[in-house]
């Protein structure tokens, strides 16, 4: 089977404000100081598994030029532009129909553009295991997601539940249920029970499998694209997408398909994964000073500890007397909040 990789790169990373903003969101930033943006690192991570010609990036129309700058190996036709955000189900349907015009029997891995993986050897093994699984006779309709072995009671991730009797015994196990982001006590319970995994948002399926799933669980979304099936892979594709995309329901593939499917599986994995979706998650992946601070920029931190301080180049800052705070300054925008309240950043910045 031909293998394809769909990179979802249309988000704005609002929980990472003010470093991530509409005009330059998180996926195009070298947040960790590695010399690579997140989207570049994601592309290189999958390149040993998928040829460059079989990558598809789905992004906001405003970011197409940024994608081409960060991934010059791709042709413009490999960058699909959503005219507006409609969540992951329409994004994946769009990419699936685009791939269908090229290859009717593809295997597809779908990934966000902005995740961190520290053990790429293990990552490649897990993704290869997933491809092997969906290629087995009788498994072409399987919908597979990667579950991450939790290392802490995290409240910022959704969880995947598997049966306790199958936990840890097989490379691929059926999913019992999906759980929304829990409160702290519930997250502690998930960790203690041992049969819950973080939902990474990485999916593996056949083109046939995801098409059948749309037909069964989100037929109204599929119908939007099916009516324009002949335009995919032609010069008319973008114009037709601009016309039909606003008619798609705003719904995630998790809620619209994965939570309803009777053919869903997960691979429990541990390859040093993080979505680096918040300042707090960044804090766990960078070097700390003697007082537990993650500092970036020209800063002085008297009596400050256990905090993230990120100040843009050319700016000086003194941050005194804070414990467990986030202080970030970019492009005339300032954030000061307790790290424990960082999930509210997205809400607080909506009116700005």
Image: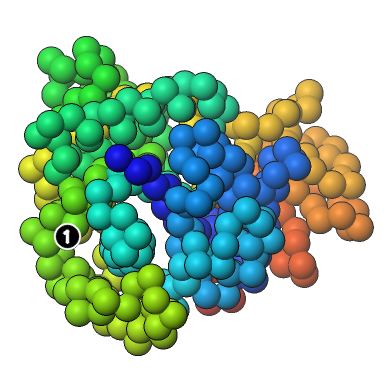
Residue 92 percent coordinates (x, y)? 32, 59
| Quarter of the image where one finds residue 228 | bottom left
Q: Report how many numbered discs are placed on residues in the image.
A: 1
Q: Is residue 327 above or below residue 248?
A: above
Judged from the image, the secondary structure of the residue bearing numbered disc 1 is helix
**Which residue: 69% across, 61% down?**
69
Q: Quadrant of the C terminus?
A: bottom right
**Which residue: 62% across, 47% down?**
40
Camera-side residue: 276 or 348? 276
Residue 322 percent coordinates (x, y)? 71, 42
The residue positioned farthest toward the top in the image shown:
169
Q: Quadrant of the N terminus?
A: top left
Q: Residue 85: in sight, yes or no?
A: yes
Camera-side residue: 144 or 161? 144
Say how the picture is coloured.
rainbow
Camera-side residue: 14 or 46? 46
Residue 198 percent coordinates (x, y)? 35, 34
| Quarter of the image where one finds residue 325 | top right
**Which residue: 16% across, 40% down?**
140
**Which residue: 62% across, 32% down?**
285
Q: Residue 109: in sight, yes or no?
A: no
Residue occupied by mark 1: 214
Sort mark 1 into few (<14), some (14-19) or many (20+) by Cα contacts within 10 Å: many
């Amino acid at each position: 089977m031909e293998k394809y990789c769909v990179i979802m790169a249309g988000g704005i990373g609002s929980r990472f404000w003010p470093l991530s903003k509409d005009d330059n969101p998180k996926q195009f930033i070298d947040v960790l100081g590695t010399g690579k943006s997140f989207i570049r690192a994601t592309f290189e991570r999958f390149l040993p598994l998928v040829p460059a010609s079989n990558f598809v990036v789905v992004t906001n129309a405003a970011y197409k030029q940024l994608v081409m700058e960060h991934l010059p190996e791709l042709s413009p036709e490999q960058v699909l532009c959503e005219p507006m955000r409609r969540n992951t189900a329409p994004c994946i349907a769009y990419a699936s129909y685009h791939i269908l015009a090229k290859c009717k029997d593809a295997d597809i891995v779908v990934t966000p553009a902005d995740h961190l993986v520290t053990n790429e050897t293990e990552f490649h093994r897990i993704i290869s295991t997933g491809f092997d699984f969906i290629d087995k006779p009788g498994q072409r309709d399987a919908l597979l997601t990667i579950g991450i072995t939790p290392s802490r009671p995290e409240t910022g991730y959704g969880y995947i539940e598997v049966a306790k009797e199958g936990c840890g015994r097989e490379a691929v196990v059926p999913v019992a249920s999906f759980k929304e982001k829990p409160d702290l006590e519930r997250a502690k319970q998930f960790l203690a029970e041992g049969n819950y995994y973080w939902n990474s948002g990485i999916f593996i399926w056949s083109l046939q499998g995801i098409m059948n799933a749309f037909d069964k669980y989100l037929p109204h979304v599929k119908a939007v694209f099916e009516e324009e099936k002949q335009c995919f892979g032609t010069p008319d594709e973008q114009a037709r997408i601009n016309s039909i995309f606003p008619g798609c329901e705003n719904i995630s593939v998790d809620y619209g398909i994965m939570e309803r499917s009777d053919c869903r599986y997960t691979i429990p994995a541990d390859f040093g994964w993080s979505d680096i979706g918040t300042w707090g998650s960044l804090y766990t992946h960078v070097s700390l000073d003697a007082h537990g601070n993650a500092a970036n920029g020209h800063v002085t931190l008297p009596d400050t500890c256990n905090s993230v301080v990120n100040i843009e180049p050319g700016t000086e800052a003194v941050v005194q007397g804070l414990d467990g705070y986030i202080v970030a300054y970019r492009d005339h925008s300032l954030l000061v909040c307790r790290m424990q309240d960082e999930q509210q950043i997205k809400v607080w910045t909506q009116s700005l």
